[in-house]
Image (cartoon, rainbow, N blue to C red):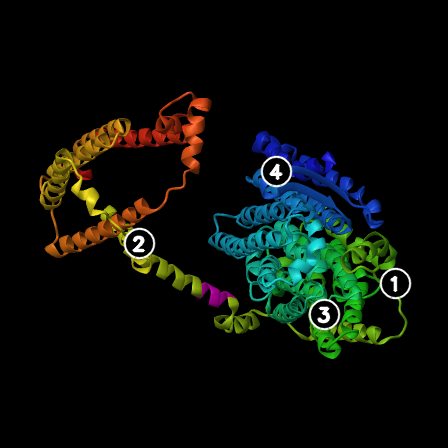
């Protein structure tokens, strides 16, 4: 299906089109940008019916067939769910941004970044080739870097963007290593074909390494403990970025990766144990932190981390019920969290603050937005008839029927209590209570700034009242695809059961904390006192020490002096050659060949030896260059003696050019070298002599080896037939390695231009 390829690449083409429009024109037609996500949402809706029935659609075009890398895209029920979330929430974010950033001088730039990010996410969730998935994975990291750093004049934004890119970038490297290793074990990079090789992936000695790489990639992207801290920092981005990246798309990439490979590793005990453990720690840690935040986006950031922990926790349980719960909760979280983020943006836009302690009484000014916030809070708390009630019941259903049910259920209840608090403190608290100084006078926002969150909130209620929509379109088919059996039947009322009791306890405790716990800056400072033991502080300290160590290495090995670089290289090569010679000595030199030297050859060798001594001992730069020139010309004679006149001519030209260039460059320098002391000369002499000795041994060893004639025979056979030349060396340089030779000539030309520029540079006296 070529239309599938076009749909995925259309976002990148659209970004190029927007770039060509220009800022001034785009400011008048900013609505135009929303056409793309709305069109894509409509297109991907067409897959909903067929994929829910088990059909799949694919498009494949060869890219690097020799390496097994193809542009291979596949639409199944899991991909359809994520594409609809990406384009559906994306459509509302594009519309919302039009008014939220109205008049911003970089509005066009923002939409370009957003379009690229959307295309990268669509490519990620539809890729059926691990290498292409990795490429789109990295594109999401790069484009999100620009979105988080949109306010690039602020130091905090720049730091947050770099932190996010660093953490997710390391995860990307882990994903690449996973792709290469898994592709090697399975014999293919196709994700769908790997299902036939799941046994090879699970029973290999490399399986633990595979899982570590997979976990590292997923945990960094989906902000799991201890890599979670980049997500709260990313809240420095504009609210549309937080809504899109951190509720429905980017942070779900790691979730998608784990779901996609759960059929491969679902029965692996390490896979399930690690996911349950990390998910549990993350959801409890993040949920607890929501109590100690006063910034609305900060609260939402930690509740997002907690929600992601819940999903990974459910994937780790690995039952049919837990997979169904994970799918439902992905939808639940996307709807209510996007609502709350958009609500936060509107409140901030109209009042100038996101501090929960400075907000209250907004219901009078923003009644419709209050309705949206209340519905989102209800869904977050899992109060019927919201879709959140379905999600929470399924979570408890998953934990109660399995190993360690009491422990897992307790963890789930505590986390959901925090989720209730977070939803109400953001969705309800700013609108009720006394009017504050910030909320005395509030202008009415544009209708798009309350309609978009309201639409998402209402959708959450509709899905709750009619759960058959989610069951028929998503959970049944995805559960069948991932776990091999149909998902659970979804309904709002299951009767008076233990699960209902747990839901009642969760809601009651969450609301109790909401009414009794008052966020304050004092509590925030109290929690900041523990930052010294936080993963963020530890990793930043490590980065600081690593920077100092890097500075030390740079100062020692790359201090700007060419002689130091040459010395380090020679020492390293001396060690390599020396180890080889001592470990495996195979040096043999025939004295008969030495006694067979001609007089002319002996004379040339003597001249070479004298020129070397003269070059080393002279204190004049120009004299040293002359000595090196004599040495080079002596080598030319050796080439001539042994039947290589063309090589001798090349060497002659190179030496002549080198001597001339050195003389032109150095003739203005002081006449005599300023050597610091004899110690340096002795050191350099020892290094040079040792290197030369071991290199000579290595060359002699190579000469004693039986040469492999295949390459020689190939060129001897084809030089004349293919290139019409009898001189094999010339044919190789001109025909077989023509581009290589051309690039070498270009490099020499650039170097010559640089030398010429230096020669023509006349500095003023105070610049010398």
Q: Is residue 132 magenta?
A: no
Indicate which disc, 2 or 1, sits on the residue closer to the N terminus. Answer: 1
Q: Is residue 212 above or below residue 67?
A: below
Give the spatial CA distance, label 3 vs label 1: 20 Å
Residue placed under numbered mark 3 in the picture: 416
Q: Is residue 589 above or below residue 198?
A: above
Indicate which disc, 1 or 4, sits on the residue closer to the N terminus. Answer: 4
Residue 211 in the figure: left or right of residue 530: right
Residue placed under numbered mark 4 in the picture: 63
Q: Secondary structure at mark 3?
A: helix
Indicate which disc, 3 or 1, sits on the residue closer to the N terminus. Answer: 3
CB under 8 Å between discs 2 and 1: no
Give the spatial CA distance, label 3 vs label 2: 72 Å
Q: Which residues are magenta?
A: 536-541
Residue 706 in the figure: left or right of residue 9: left
Indicate which disc, 3 or 2, sits on the residue closer to the N terminus. Answer: 3
């Amino acid at each position: 299906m070529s239309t599938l390829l076009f749909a995925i690449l259309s976002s990148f083409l659209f970004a190029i089109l927007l770039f060509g429009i220009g800022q001034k024109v785009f400011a008048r037609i900013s609505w135009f940008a929303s056409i793309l996500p709305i069109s894509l949402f409509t297109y991907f809706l067409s897959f909903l019916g067929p994929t829910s029935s088990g059909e799949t659609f694919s498009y494949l075009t060869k890219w690097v067939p020799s390496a097994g890398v193809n542009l291979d895209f596949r639409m199944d029920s899991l991909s359809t769910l994520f594409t609809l979330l990406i384009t559906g929430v994306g459509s509302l974010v594009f519309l919302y941004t039009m008014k939220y950033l109205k008049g911003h001088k970089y509005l066009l730039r923002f939409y370009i970044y957003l379009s690229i990010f959307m295309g990268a996410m669509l490519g990620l969730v539809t890729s059926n080739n691990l290498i292409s998935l990795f490429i789109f994975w990295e594109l999401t990291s790069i484009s999100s870097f620009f979105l988080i750093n949109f306010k690039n004049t602020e130091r905090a934004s720049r730091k947050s963007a770099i932190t996010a890119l660093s953490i997710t970038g390391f995860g990307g490297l882990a994903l690449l290593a996973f792709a290469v290793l898994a592709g090697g074990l399975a014999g293919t990079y196709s994700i769908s074909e790997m299902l036939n090789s799941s046994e090879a992936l699970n029973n290999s000695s490399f399986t633990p390494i595979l899982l570590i790489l997979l976990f590292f990639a997923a945990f960094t992207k989906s902000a799991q403990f201890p890599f979670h801290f980049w997500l709260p920092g990313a809240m420095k981005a504009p609210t549309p970025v937080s809504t899109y990246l951190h509720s429905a798309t980017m942070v779900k990439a790691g979730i998608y990766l784990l779901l996609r490979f759960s059929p491969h590793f679902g029965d692996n005990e390490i896979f399930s144990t690690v996911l349950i453990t990390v998910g549990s720690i993350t959801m409890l840690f993040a949920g607890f932190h929501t109590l100690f935040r006063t910034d609305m986006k900060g609260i939402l950031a930690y509740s997002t981390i907690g929600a992601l922990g819940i999903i990974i926790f459910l994937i780790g349980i690995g039952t049919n019920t837990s997979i169904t719960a994970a799918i439902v909760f992905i939808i639940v979280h996307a709807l209510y969290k996007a609502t709350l983020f958009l609500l936060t943006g509107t409140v901030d836009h109209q009042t100038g603050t996101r501090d929960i302690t400075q907000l209250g009484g907004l219901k009078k000014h923003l009644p419709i937005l209050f309705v949206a916030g209340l519905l989102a809070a209800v869904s977050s708390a899992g109060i019927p008839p919201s879709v959140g009630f379905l999600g929470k019941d399924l979570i408890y259903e998953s934990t109660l029927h399995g190993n360690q049910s009491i422990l897992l259920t307790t963890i789930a209840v505590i986390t959901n209590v925090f989720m209730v608090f977070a939803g109400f403190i953001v969705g309800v608290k700013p609108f009720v209570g006394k009017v504050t100084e910030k909320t005395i006078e509030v202008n009415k926002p544009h209708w798009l700034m309350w309609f978009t969150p309201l639409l998402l909130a209402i959708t959450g209620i509709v899905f709750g009242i009619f759960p058959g929509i989610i069951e028929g379109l998503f959970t049944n088919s995805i559960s069948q695809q991932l776990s091999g059996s149909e998902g659970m039947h979804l309904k709002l009322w299951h009767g008076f059961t233990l699960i209902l009791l747990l839901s009642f306890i969760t809601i009651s405790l969450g609301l109790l904390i909401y009414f009794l716990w008052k966020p304050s800056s004092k509590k925030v400072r109290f929690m900041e006192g523990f930052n010294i033991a936080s993963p963020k502080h530890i990793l930043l300290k490590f980065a600081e020490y690593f920077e100092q160590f890097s500075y030390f290495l740079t100062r020692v090995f790359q201090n700007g002096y060419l002689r130091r670089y040459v010395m380090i290289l020679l020492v390293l090569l001396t060690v390599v050659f020396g180890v080889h010679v001592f470990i495996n000595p195979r040096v043999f030199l025939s004295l008969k060949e030495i006694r067979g030297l001609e007089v002319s050859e002996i004379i040339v060798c003597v001249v070479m030896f004298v020129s070397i001594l003269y070059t080393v001992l002279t204190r004049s730069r120009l004299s040293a260059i002359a000595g090196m020139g004599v040495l080079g010309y002596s080598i030319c004679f050796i080439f001539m003696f042994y039947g290589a006149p063309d090589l001798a001519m090349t060497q002659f030209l190179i030496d002549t050019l080198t001597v001339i260039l050195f003389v032109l460059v150095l003739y203005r320098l002081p006449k005599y070298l300023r050597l610091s002391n004899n110690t340096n000369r002795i050191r350099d002499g020892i290094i040079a002599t040792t290197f030369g000795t071991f290199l000579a041994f290595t060359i002699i060893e190579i000469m004693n080896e039986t040469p492999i004639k295949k390459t020689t025979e190939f060129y001897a056979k084809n030089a004349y037939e293919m290139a019409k030349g009898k001189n094999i060396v010339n044919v190789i340089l001109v025909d077989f390695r023509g581009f290589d030779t051309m690039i070498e000539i270009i490099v020499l030309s650039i170097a010559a231009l640089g030398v010429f520029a230096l020669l023509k540079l006349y500095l003023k006296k105070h610049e010398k």
